[in-house]
Structures are given as structure tokens and as C-alpha cells.
Image (cartoon, helix red, strand yellow):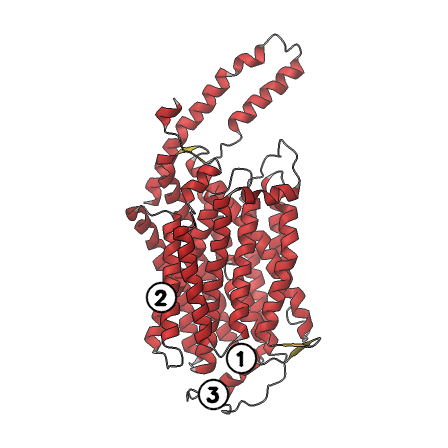
Amino acid sequence: MAETSVNEMESNQEPVSMACEIGKNDDSHLMATPDVNNTATKIERAEEIYSSAYTDTLAKPSNREVGFWYLYELCSYFIHNTLVPVLFPLIISQILKLPPEPAGGWTSTHYGSSCTKKEIQLYETLTHRSITLSNSKFSPLEWTSFSWGIGLFLAAPIVGSISTHLDHGHNQLLITAAAIAIGAFFCLPAGFFKVTWIFPPYIAAIVAASIVATASHTRHLGLMIRGFTGPALQTTQFPERSGVSSWLSLYATAAGGIGSAIISTFIYHMLSHGEQFISLWIVSIFSGLIWLAGLPHVLSIEPAPPSANSISSISHFLSIFKYPHAIGSLVLAFLSSFTTMSIFTSAVLYLIGELCFKPSFILYCWLAYFLFPIVSLPLMHPLQQISKANAVKMHLIGFYLSIVTAAVGFYFRGKIWHKGLVLVLAGIQGTSVGVSHAFGRVLLIDCSPQGKEGSFCGWLSWSRALGTCVGYAVASAIPGNVGTCFGIAFFTAIFGALFLNHGNISDLGGAVAAGLVSDLQPETQA
């Protein structure tokens, strides 16, 4: 189905090219007008005409370009769902002293589940507020969310200041490469100093670098879609654009799940070693090297032409507020990322600390969560094509799946969960995360005008990271109350679904407002 869509769009580019040729020929008499008396002026006039004819035309992306774009997703998707929320709290917990023995002892929970002393000690160390800052106390989980928030605060002005450079000029390659290199570098020294205060700068730098690099990566998706489909489409051609964009985004997200599964498996393997601090530090180094392995993606980025009109970075960055559909997509990105991360964090803590499931089974849950989308997400593409569903309806599926997971988890709160049910829910929720991630960026790209993709994608990257951080912070603050976390996630997902249904958000409407699609039929234009 994806190849058919791409071939159809290639044929649709021919009239566009012919139109450019006709425009060039029709304007050729302007270069010969009597008021032009010197060769320099003729050349300048010709450059303006040829520039206007060909500025919006992009070459079809090669297999190498698409492959490198997938590669970066594989090498970076784990940052906000495994590296920051799972690995760093574990590393921080190894620095702290053992907390006081809980009331039920080191071998059982208040649900009556039998545990090993090592498992209970790990859970108590992660959730006990033993880090002091001024008059406040933080657990390793809360310390991570605090550091995450610093990264978001740091990233906001950076994304705003570089938004113009992401869309215009020749600095996209340098910005993206620098962000990846800086983020990967701060993964390396995580074990140099066994003090908790060093982790906020580490985590903040990684989060900020990831937001910038993800913005550039998502912008590249918009350029590839335009390369496959052409710069100007009619309303009747928009479903074909949707087919191409969902194909690219879904398969990339599935590839990202592989990277997350690799890192989570490595974490499990290294936790079984005697010196856990050093072992987890090795995982951090490995994560940085994996992230750095996505650097070839930068080589496939085509530099954008400089802007014809000078515009301030602030005006360019704030121009998104002129596009209501794009603003709506940012709200959805926040809601979906908040929902999925709060479910993920609260469920993992409940399985470890309350139900005392064995570490090997926690690994199976992670693998189901990250690897099941390898099967389910590619199947979403033909489903979308058959049902003719747009990005909004597909995004709804993500919210509906989260609603199911949250509702079941809330219903069984305080009870012993059957392992088979847990694995099924892990696969369902993993699919929800993948669908929301894939179609969230497709919806934003559909609402992004040409020449502003980088700015809009910067907003998307930051909003998604904000939702993930807030969801993680909420679940970390009440680790023993899974019912409350699942209840909050349930109502957030309900609100997101209602917002999609009644918020007047449309991918087609956003594309028309952004000038990507003409709302006039060809015969009307003629």
C-alpha cells in the first residue's frame, strides 16, 4: 500500500514540474522588457523568476535518506522512555544509603507478596525521599523528574533561538550534529562522581539536546513527505499524502521500539552484576554510543535556502499561534505523552514494589511493551488505508487503547494481577504509545507551512517532552497509589479523545490553512 501511494504521488509531481516550466516560459518575456538595460539586471531578474519556480520543489528522498532517518529513530527513541526515566534513577539509587526497613520487613509487601531482600531494597531506595535540597526531600525518581524539568526549562529558549536556523540557511546540519554529540557526551561521565548533585546538569543537558535533535529529525519528515508528494496538492490528493506520511512515521516508530528493547534488556542484564553502580554506568555509556550511532542521519539533511525576508527568531518561533490546528496538535502531544508515561511509570513501580514480580518477568513486560509495536504498528498502515482514516482518527486509537489499559488497571487496583493479563496490557499500551507518537507528529507536520517546519517541530518536541516529564513526575510522587495514577491517566485520555472529537482539529483543515493543500478543485482553478 505504501509503495502504491508513493508511485501515485510521483506521477502527481509531473504536472507540478510542467507548471513550473510553463511559469518559466510565460515569464520569459519579462527578461526581455525594454526597461531592462544592462546584463546584471537581466541576470538578477532571471534568478528571481527561476527561484520562484523551483523553491518549493524537492527531490524524491532516496532509500539511503529514508534509511538514515529510520536509523536515528532507532538510536534515539529510547532517550525519553528508557534512558532518563529508568536508567538514571537506578544509577542515582546506587549512590544513596539504604533506607530504613519497611514495616513489613525486607521479604514481603502489604499485599502479602513474597519478595527477595534485594528487590524490596531496590524499590525502597528508588522511592524513599533521601536526597535533600534546601528544605525539600526527593527520591531518586523525583530527583530525576526535577532534573528533567531543568532540561525543559533550558531547552525552551534554545529551541526558540534556533528555530529560524532550522528552517533557513545552512546551519541545520551543524545544529543537529552538535545536539546529538552534546547529548551523547553527557551520557558518558555519569559514573565519574558518586554524588547526586551532578545528575541534574547531566540529565538536563541530555533532555535539552534530545529536544533539539528531535525537532530537526521531525522537520526532516516534513521535507521527505513533500519530496514524495510534491509541494502543491489538491484536496482529493490529500489521502495519498496521508498514506506516505503514516507509512514513514509508523515504521520509524517501530524501529525505535527495537532500540528501547535493547537498552532495557541491557539494564536488566547489568543489574544482575555485583557492582551495580559501575554496571549501570556502562549502560549509560553504551546508550550514548548508540545515540551517537544515529549521527549519519545528519548527512542526509539537505540545507535549506536562506530566507528571502529577514525575520526575527522570536517572530518565527511564535508564528505557530496563527495556526489553530497546529496548536491543537501540541495539546494532543502533551496529553498523550502525559497519559502514556504516567501509566508506564506507575505500572512498573506497582509490579516491582507491590506485587514483587521477578526481574525476569519485568523484562518480559518491557519487551512486550517495546517489541509488540513492531508487529502492530506496520499493520496500522493498511488498516488506515482500508478505512480511509486520517491522522486525527488514528490518533484517537491511541487514546482509546490508553483508556482500556487505565480502566483495567484501575479496576484491578489493590489486587494481584495475572501475568498473562499484564503481558497483554503491556502490548496494548505499547501500541498506544507508538500510535500516538507516530500520528502526533504526522498531524503537526500536516499543519506546518513550508519554511516553518523546524519551528513547529521544535514546539512539538518540547510539548511532548513536557507531557512525558509531568506524567513521570506525577507517578513518581505517589509510587504506592497505582489506583490514583491510573485514574488520572484514564480521565486525561478521555479528555484527549473528547478534545480530538470536538476540538475542531483536522489534518486536512490544518494543511489547507498552512498552504500545503488547495481547497479549490482543479476545474475551479482553471
- Image vertical order of residue 436 relative to residue 84, above or below: above
- Assess whether mark 2 and mark 1 are in contact (beta carbons under 8 angstroms): no
- Assess whether mark 3 and mark 1 are in contact (beta carbons under 8 angstroms): no
The residue sitting at 56% across, 90% down in the picture is: 101
Q: Earlier in the sequence, mark 1 or mark 2?
A: 1
Amino acid type, mark 2: Val
The residue sitting at 41% across, 68% down in the picture is: 367
Quarter of the rendering occupied by the N terminus: top left
Mark 2 or 3, closer to the camera: 2
- Percent coordinates x, y for residue 482 in the rendering: 45, 76
Quadrant in the rendering for residue 517: top left
Q: Which mark is residue 471?
A: none
The residue sitting at 37% across, 81% down in the picture is: 415
Residue most toward the top?
34
Quarter of the rendering occupied by the C terminus: top left
Q: Which residue is mark 3?
A: 116
Amino acid type, mark 3: Thr
The residue sitting at 63% across, 48% down in the picture is: 160
- Image vertical order of residue 255 relative to residue 486, above or below: above
Residue most toward the front?
502
Query: Can residue 372 be seen from the camera position used here?
Result: no
Quadrant in the rendering for residue 142: bottom right
Q: Secondary structure at mark 3?
A: loop
Q: Which residue is mark 2?
A: 404
- Image vertical order of residue 130 relative to residue 329, above or below: below
Mark 1 or 3, closer to the camera: 3
- Percent coordinates x, y for residue 375 in the rendering: 35, 59
Q: Earlier in the sequence, mark 2 or mark 3?
A: 3
Label 3: how many residues lie within 10 Å, few (<14), some (14-19) or many (20+)? few
